[in-house]
Image (spheres, rainbow, N blue to C red):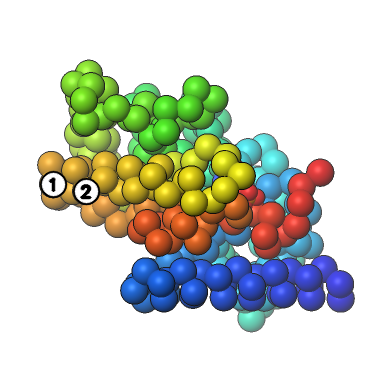
Amino acid sequence: MIIQEMIAKNLASVQAEIAAACQRAGRPVETVKLVGISKTHPPEMLLAALQAGLRDLGENRVEEAAPKIAEVLSRLPANIAPPTWHMVGHVQSRKARSVVETFDVIHSLDDLKLARRFGTFAGEQKAIREVLLEINISGEESKEGIAAQNWQNDADQRQNLWSLVQEISQLSNIRLVGLMTMAPYYAEPEATRLVFAALRGLRDALINDFPQITWRELSMGMTNDYSVAIEEGATMVRVGRAIFGERE
Ligand SMILES: *Cc1c(COP(=O)(O)O)cnc(C)c1O
């Protein structure tokens, strides 16, 4: 079957690149989780990726993802375990409930009110959702996320983020596990290195000030730049096009 073969081949080459980047960085390959970003693609493609061994899938819009995920799960062969589902797109407050009901891990938390809603809805389901804070570390205006490009020099910006972390760490039913960022698009992937290093630097400062929080995850790197992100410490890479092909 054509789709199955294409996706298996793409997945193998992404996994090989991840292994090579880990080797260059002196990191065990198990320290990097590949999250396949399947937005815009039909259930068949997700099923093919799961059949080829992918264990984590991510989407950016809950309206698209919820029915698609239900269909994938209903068609999943008995010998394949359900994957972990990741939400990587911006979440509007009114969609918080369906996001909590649909996904296991939420990469795009950027607001205290949203965090409280996640906690409430996860509590109703007697569940715990892992969340990452989405950080705008490059300062690019078009980017979502908590502004932090200047956290080392701008006391207000730092205070804002630090108190958000403090408040979120008190909430029940959500567990803060790390940071996520989207780098600006540069034709040359090397140019993203400073952006990824900056997110890691921020994470290190947060480890220092909030040692009780796990800070396990750095979600950074996409098709264009995941190798560089791994060299700079990414623990989750979000790869769409290199696995599923170009989007319409
Ligand atoms: C679409 C998307 C990706 C994947 O991008 P590719 O360039 O297809 O690898 C990663 N992260 C987020 C937040 C996305 O929206």
Image position of 210 with respect to 73: above or below: above
Residue 179 falls in image quadrant: top left
Residue drawn at (70%, 69%), measured in percent from left and top? 10
**In the image as oriented, which residue stretches furthest toward the right?**
1
Q: Quadrant of the image for the C terminus?
A: top right
Q: Position of residue 93 (x, y in %)?
A: 49, 25
Residue 55 visible in this rendered orientation of the protein: yes
Q: Which residue is mark 1?
A: 208
Image position of 195 with respect to 113: above or below: below
Q: As rendered, which of 228 and 2 lies closer to the eye?
A: 228
Image position of 243 with respect to 152: above or below: below
Query: Which amino acid is tagged 1?
Result: Asn
Q: How many marks?
A: 2
Labels 1 and 2 touching (C-beta < 8 A): yes
Mark 2 Cα shell of 10 Å, populated few (<14), some (14-19), many (≥20): few
| Position of residue 188 in the picture relative to residue 194 (left or right) | right
**In the image as oriented, which residue stretches furthest toward the bottom?**
79
Q: Which residue is mark 2?
A: 204
Q: Is mark 1 within 8 Å of ligand 1?
A: no
Q: Position of residue 40 (x, y in %)?
A: 74, 46
Q: Position of residue 163 (x, y in %)?
A: 21, 28
| Position of residue 36 in the picture relative to residue 109 (left or right) | right
Q: Secondary structure at mark 2?
A: helix
Q: As rendered, which of 170 and 219 lies closer to the eye?
A: 219
Residue drawn at (34%, 30%), measured in percent from left and top? 149
Q: Position of residue 170 (x, y in %)?
A: 21, 37
Query: Which amino acid is tagged 2?
Result: Asp
